[in-house]
Image (tube, rainbow, N blue to C red):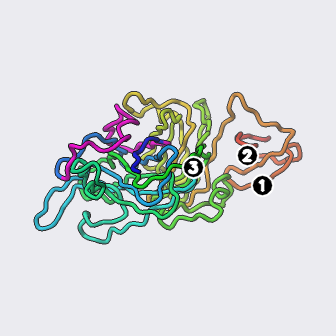
């Protein structure tokens, strides 16, 4: 059977083009328009923006063999060879929706039309025969395992045109899809492994800022969910990374977050007030509460984790119970009952999901 995208779990919009958001998320559901041809592409698309990404799936279906991804690529010349206006996108796949692996790609050919393993390379010809996938064109990805989730990330760095403003998603088809009744609950941390990225003990490496960092590789992506960063005086968060990274965040309404630091400094302190200056088309708005935070690298980046300096007004640390205490630079110096800790200084106190910055005199 053929199935089409029917679920968006997260859309992290990058900088640049906002095209298609007036009909989000439905604009990417279902097949491409039958009017789209290799020389006259579809405009029924959702732009991811520069370095944006989207996590999608198919309800109660899994992939056994193949998916076909459609972007609004178009042929610009066939003399002397096929030339295209392409906007490349990296594709990641996952069995469990928690860890995603990069689909292998080859960009060695001087003509982008012959690149393999990327989306946004081949034009669309769906209307030639809607019942024959062999003539649909688009970008083909083959699997021999149970795959339930797909993540596509704009790769503006590989675009060869000055007019590129972000990968434009039209549609994705799952060919030979099989039904599988399953209930998916998105995890608190999601990891899309970049080129040369590390997977060994990856989740523990980023749970705490303790000097034990995770190399997420080139174009690696980390997503933190169920956060509660609230905009109040003195409240901020800190990304512990050895190189600049891109940071996305928002309250996650309609599974949407926005790129609010196009390029951070290493060890960036992110002031939530900066979100208010963003311009986002209706129906989206940037709130002053961050529940989803994402980090994306362009080069090998060793991420130690995130520090959130606040306490939710409804939550307090129970000082009669065990806590973990860190120095400001992220070193774990104590684990146990708070009452037995007697050092003076500035520390980060953690207990379950609560984090507090505390000055002890």
CB under 8 Å between callouts 2 and 3?
A: no
Q: Earlier in the sequence, mark 1 or mark 3?
A: 3
In the current view of this chain or complex, which residue is farthest to the left? 79
| Quarter that holds the C terminus | top right
For label 3, the SS is strand
Q: Position of residue 281 (x, y in %)?
A: 37, 31
CB under 8 Å between callouts 1 and 2?
A: yes
Q: Position of residue 322 (x, y in %)?
A: 83, 45
Where 82 falls versus 10 (above or below)? below
On the picture, is 334 further left or further right than 138?
Answer: right
Magenta segment: 9-38
Q: Position of residue 259 (x, y in %)?
A: 44, 43
On the picture, is 260 further left or further right than 113?
Answer: right
On the picture, is 320 further left or further right than 74?
Answer: right
Please name whichever residue, 200 or 176, is drawn nearer the observer in this view of the structure.
176
Please name whichever residue, 328 or 53, is drawn nearer the observer in this view of the structure.
53
Q: Which residue is mark 1?
A: 333
Please name whichever residue, 14 or 71, is drawn nearer the observer in this view of the structure.
71
Query: What is the C-alpha distance between the residues marked 1 and 2?
Result: 10 Å
Where 277 falls versus 152 (above or below)? above
| Label disc, if present, on residue 27 of the rendered structure | none
Q: Which residue is mark 2?
A: 347
Q: Nearer the viewer, mark 2 or mark 3?
A: 3
Mark 3, other Cα within 10 Å: few <14 / some 14–19 / many ≥20: many
Q: How many marks?
A: 3
Q: Which residue is mark 3?
A: 239
């Amino acid at each position: 059977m053929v199935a089409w995208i029917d679920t968006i779990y997260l859309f992290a919009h990058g900088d640049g083009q906002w095209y298609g958001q007036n009909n989000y998320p439905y604009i990417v559901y279902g097949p491409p328009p039958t009017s789209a041809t290799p020389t006259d592409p579809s405009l029924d698309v959702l732009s991811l923006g520069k370095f944006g990404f989207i996590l999608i799936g198919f309800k109660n279906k899994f992939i056994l063999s193949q998916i076909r991804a459609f972007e609004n690529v178009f042929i610009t010349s066939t003399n002397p060879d096929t030339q295209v206006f392409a906007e490349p996108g990296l594709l990641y796949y996952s069995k469990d929706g928690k860890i995603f692996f990069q689909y292998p790609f080859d960009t060695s050919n001087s003509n982008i039309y012959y690149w393999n393993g990327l989306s946004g390379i081949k034009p669309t010809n769906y209307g030639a025969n809607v019942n024959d996938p062999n003539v649909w064109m688009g970008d083909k990805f083959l699997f021999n395992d149970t795959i339930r989730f797909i993540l596509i990330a704009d790769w503006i760095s590989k675009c060869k045109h000055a007019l590129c403003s972000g990968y434009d998603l039209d549609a994705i088809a799952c060919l030979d899809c099989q039904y599988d009744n399953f209930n998916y609950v998105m995890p608190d941390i999601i990891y899309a492994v970049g080129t040369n990225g590390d997977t060994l003990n990856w989740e523990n490496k980023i749970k705490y800022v303790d000097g034990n960092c995770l190399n997420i590789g080139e174009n690696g992506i980390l997503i933190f969910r169920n956060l509660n960063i609230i905009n109040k005086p003195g409240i901020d968060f800190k990304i512990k990374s050895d190189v600049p990274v891109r940071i996305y965040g928002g309250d996650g309404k309609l599974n949407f977050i926005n790129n609010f630091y196009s390029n951070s400094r290493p060890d960036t302190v992110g002031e939530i007030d900066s979100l208010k200056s963003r311009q986002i088309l209706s129906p989206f708005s940037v709130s002053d509460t961050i529940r989803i935070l994402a980090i994306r690298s362009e080069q090998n980046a060793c991420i130690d984790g995130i520090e959130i300096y606040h306490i939710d007004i409804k939550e307090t640390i129970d000082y009669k119970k065990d806590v973990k205490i860190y120095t400001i630079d992220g070193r774990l110096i104590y684990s146990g009952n708070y009452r037995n800790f007697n050092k003076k200084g500035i520390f980060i106190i953690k207990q379950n999901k609560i984090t507090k910055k505390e000055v002890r005199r």
